[in-house]
Image (spheres, rainbow, N blue to C red):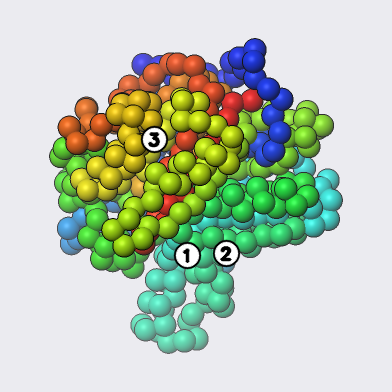
Amino acid sequence: MTTATQARPAAPADTPAVTGSVVTGIGVAAPNGLGTEAWWAATLRGESGIRPVTRFDASRYPVRLAGEVPGFVDAAHLPSRLLPQTDRVTRLSLTAAKEALDDSGTDPDALPDYGAGVVTASSAGGFEFGQRELQALWSKGGSHVSAYQSFAWFYAVNTGQISIRHGLRGSSGVVVAEQAGGLDALAHARRQIRKGAALMVTGGVDSALCPWGWAAHLAADELSRVTDPARAYLPFDAAASGHVVGEGGALFVLESATAARERGARAYGAFTGYAATFDGPGAPRLADAARLALADAGLHPEDVDVVFADAAGARAADRAEAEAIAALFGPRGVPVTAPKSMTGRLLAGGASLDVAAALLSLRDQVIPPTTGTAAPAADCPVDLVTAPRRTALRHALVLARGRGGFNSAAVLGAV
């Protein structure tokens, strides 16, 4: 089986000088690997992180599978002073942010004051922290509720804690668009780079694997109830019955291509195009988001070498996405992959992790596989990649749909 390589293949001779925004650092916390290279190697090996839930007793629930980040010992990654005031999701976010900054070779202390900021995506905030404090309120009384509850539950807390820990005092924010949010955060960060920011930490991480979060996941009635981890989440498969939820995501260091070149930084790839649309009544607009993102990048459909699909894992939603892809590229006209089949859907972290996979695909010139699904259903006319595929890659398109009608698309380019 193909494995990841550390060396980045030379770009084709006709690669133009990159302008705009580039990614110079990646940090990953995923159910099939903690840390970027560990996760990428596992992804190329087709290793799944979907397993029976261990973070709480799920035996009484109709769904008992999830993608949990393995081997994460909180105290090994964070100073003790932060542990009482942070939720699991914030601890994962802080760890991924540090990896991304270290990977980029950036010294935050050397950045200009107010010249670097943070924009993250979140869907749930600190759900587990909130559940614990509600339990304390109702079982022991208000005096037993932590003062940190005032912010630890909040969906903007990841941005705030990353900003404080690394002294990133520039323009910051948070976006909430479920699965689409991971791409939206990158777009907001790119806007700040265009306005003159030296650097932005951006992306998305989510985690709500606790009874309170589980109740929210179950309420949507979109989770697969299959008990076999290898068969529970089958994007584009005729037997698709819903998705598996997971935790984690990816964070990035985004900066201008000019600034990256001036400091001699290695760039994984360029963030060249983005668009967002919103579905109307009976009018899905994912294909429009993809077209607009390509236009923003100055590309045509034939310039795209791989699509990282949203991959809902539900028959109607998969069919709609396959039709959107076919409308743009033709039936089976472009390789399509869904490595999230190995992690589950990570809410705001899902599209961010797909961006990380797209960037590493461009670096290593290999498309990661979709696992579980042996072949797409007849009504899903996509060229689904089910084993690592080595091929020339210049541009990748990432698609994401958030619950409620959000659609986002991003284009990444080789450098």
The amino acid at mark 1 is: Gly
Discs 3, 1 touching: Cβ within 8 Å = no
Residue 405 located left or right of residue 238: right
Q: Nearer the viewer, residue 164 or 142?
A: 164
The amino acid at mark 3 is: Leu
Q: Point out which mark residue 126 bears.
A: 1
Which structural element holds mark 3?
helix
Q: Which of 142 and 151 is in front in this view?
A: 151
Q: Nearer the viewer, residue 97 or 346?
A: 346
Q: Where is residue 130 in the image (x, y as percent from the top left)?
A: 44, 71
Q: Residues within 10 Å of mark 3 (few under 14, many from 20)?
A: some
Q: Where is residue 49 in the image (x, y as percent from the top left)?
A: 34, 39
Which structural element holds mark 1?
loop
Q: Residues within 10 Å of mark 2 (few under 14, many from 20)?
A: many
Q: Can residue 49 be seen in this view?
A: no
Q: Position of residue 319 (x, y in %)?
A: 24, 42
Which structural element holds mark 2?
helix
Q: Where is residue 72 in the image (x, y as percent from the top left)?
A: 47, 46
Point out the image quarter for the N terminus.
Answer: top left
Q: Distance between the residues labelled 3 and 2?
A: 38 Å
Q: Name the residue under label 2.
A: 157
Q: How far apart are marks 2 and 1 (CA)?
A: 8 Å
Q: Mark 3 points at which residue?
A: 328
Q: Can residue 284 be seen in this view?
A: yes
Point out the image quarter for the C terminus.
Answer: top right
Give the residue at x 15% y 39%: 239
| Mark in the foreground, 3 or 1 | 3
Q: Work out whether mark 3 precedes mark 2 in sequence or the reverse, and give the earlier one.
A: 2
Discs 2, 1 touching: Cβ within 8 Å = yes
